Every structure is written in C-alpha cells, then in structure tokens.
Amino acid sequence: MNDLFSVLKKNNYFVTFFFLAVCTLVAFLFAHVIPGNSPNIALVYILGLILIARHTDGYRYGIFAALFCVISINYFFTYPYFKLNFTLSGYPVTFIGMLTITIITSATTTRLKKQALLISEREKVLVEADKEKMKANLLRAISHDLRTPLTSIIGAASSYTENSNHLTEEEKTELVTQINDDANWLLNMVENLLTVTRIQNDESHVSTSLEVVEEVVSEAVHRLRKRIPHAKINISIPEAFLMVPMDPLLIEQVIMNLLENAVIHSESKQAVDLVVTDSSDSVTFHVIDYGKGLDEDKIPSLFEGQSASGSSDSHKGMGIGLSICKTIIQAHNGTICAFNHENGAEFSFTLPKEGIHES
C-alpha cells in the first residue's frame, strides 16, 4: 500500500487531477455554505495551483491547472451558473493572475528541486568516497595483519614438525600456545570483518531492542577474560537501571575490541577502567588505560583501518578492530572517539537512548 502511494505521488498526472478534484470539492462546499463567495473560491484554487506547481515537474501541469481553475470558476461559480461566459469583466485578469502565480511557483520549485538534487548527488559522491577510502584502508590493513599471524603459525608449526624429536615439552607447549593465540586472533578478525559485511549489506542499519547496559557490559568482559585470562579490568556503572536500544552482540563486540586494545597496546600492568556514564538522552562507555598513550599524529585516522600503535607486535594491530567499532557505532546512530589523557589513552563511544527499533 505504501509502495502504491509512493508511485502515485511521483505521477504528475495523478497529483494534478487529485489537487484539482479536492479544490473543486472544497469550492462547492464554500458555494453551498456561503453563496456568492467568489473571492474565497478563487483563493482555494490559487492554493491548489501552488500545491500542483510544488509537487509536479515542469510547467505544463501548472498551466493546464490554471486554465482548468479559471474555466471552473467561470462555469460552476459565476452567474449564470453552469454556462461559460467569456465576456465577464475581469476574466482575463483572473486568468493572467492565476497563470502568473503558477509559472512563478513552478519556476521557483523547479530551481529548488534542481539545487536539492545537486546537493543530494554531491553528498552521495562524498559518502561513496568515504566508503571507498575506508575499504582501501581496510584492505591494506587486512593484507598486512593477516599475513603476519599466518606466517607465525606456519613458522611455529614447521618448527614443531621438523624438530619435534629435539624439542622439550616446555618448548612444544610454547609453540602450540603461540599457534593457538594467533589462530584465535585470526578468528576474531574474521568475525569483525563478517560484522562489517553484515552491516553494509543492511545499508548501515541494525535491528535494535532495549537492552540492560549492565548485562551487556558484564557479558563483554566475561568473553574478553575467556580470551585474555590475565586481563585486569575495573568496571564502574551507574546504580540507576539503564536500558539502551542496541544490538547487544555488536555492542559487546565493540566493548571487547576496545578493552583488548587497551590491555594489549597500553603496555601497562595497571588495570583498565571501563566506565559507563549516563545523561538525559544518551549513555557513554569509556575505556581508559594507563599506558604509553596514542600517537597524536595518527589519532585522526585511527578509525579508518590504520594502526595508531607503535608496537612491534604488529600482527595484533588495532586498526581493523577500531574501524569495525566505528562502523557498528555509526549504525547505531552513535559517535566514537579517542584521545590521550595525562596517564594514557581513552576510547569512548556514545549511544542515544532513543534509537532504531526494528527487532
């Protein structure tokens, strides 16, 4: 039904005849309630002409409507009724006046539509350019970040198979642990990339439902500690019962990515703080570490798939994870940012309390 209505709205003939029919019905109502009230009837048709010029393309529909309006006023609402009389005084003035109003409105509307279309096309070009830039950055990061752990896995596996008779049990355990860590990191990155694909296929929208913030945070921290058992995390959540529209699995993934970056890249033994703050229209999640901080020069491109860490442990670069975080938060109509504080770095993202409910 909505599709049919949208199609009809774009049909210039339908729009023209619809407004003319409505105006004629209203004019008859005026004529019945207040006989001889020609000025009001003329105003009804003038309003109809403006609406037709506004919602149709080009001039011909407005000119046709102006001609119809003048003839209708002459035929239906001017004595002698239901007869055409072109000798009435002021008839040419009425026709020229309505025609002028129609042409001016059509010209103005056409110009505004062209400007709006031009602006829309420019915005689309900019959006596509941003998407292509992000894709290029992701591909560069992926080609590097996939190659390094794969090379590490191959090297560790080769060392194990070729030298198994000469390795101690401790060395064997170390190689297997290395393979396991790299494989788990690769699996996590594949999950991130699948998430981006899912969101992009849904045209950057996600289905959300009201979720309890404390439960989402707890689950994210629980999953992270299974992946990084030694992770030290301090959690601070308001006592108030907070519910925010979100896709809980995606937001858990964002929290996990930010916490993992803080634990691994801060190079600090101090615990990472996960702080949730509440405001009237949004909830903000802060991940604060007390390590070496971020490279100030790379912060502007931090969420575009480029690493901002100077760590030599390049196979666990944070660039891809942060670009996925940005994609997820933007799909929730939220914002995400990063900056340095006196003793380290902070990542924070904000989710609106009123969002998309499509679940």
Image (cartoon, rainbow, N blue to C red):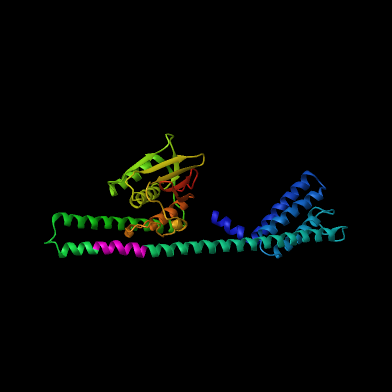
Magenta-drawn stretch, dominant element (helix, strand or loop)? helix
- 151 within the magenta span: yes
Q: Quadrant of residue 188?
A: bottom left
Viewer-proximal residue among 75 and 184: 184
Q: Is 14 situated left or right of 232 in this image?
A: right
Labels in figure, total? 0
Q: Position of residue 94 (x, y in %)?
A: 82, 58
Q: Is 327 situated left or right of 190 in this image?
A: right
Quadrant of the image for the N terminus?
Answer: bottom right
Q: Quadrant of residue 312?
A: bottom left
Q: Is residue 234 above or below residue 129?
A: above
Q: Which residues are magenta?
A: 142-153
Viewer-proximal residue among 105 and 320: 320
Q: Residue at x 58, y 61 (%)?
A: 120
Q: Is 92 situated left or right of 149 in this image?
A: right
Q: Residue at x 36, y 50 (%)?
A: 266
Q: Is residue 154 above or below residue 294?
A: below
Residue 282 in sight from this viewpoint: yes
Q: Is residue 236 above or below residue 53?
A: above
Q: Is 352 situated left or right of 255 in this image?
A: right
Q: Position of residue 165 (x, y in %)?
A: 11, 62
Viewer-proximal residue among 258 and 251: 258
- 166 within the magenta span: no
Q: Position of residue 132 (x, y in %)?
A: 47, 64
Q: Residue furthest top?
A: 239
Residue 1 in sight from this viewpoint: no
Q: Position of residue 44 (x, y in %)?
A: 75, 51
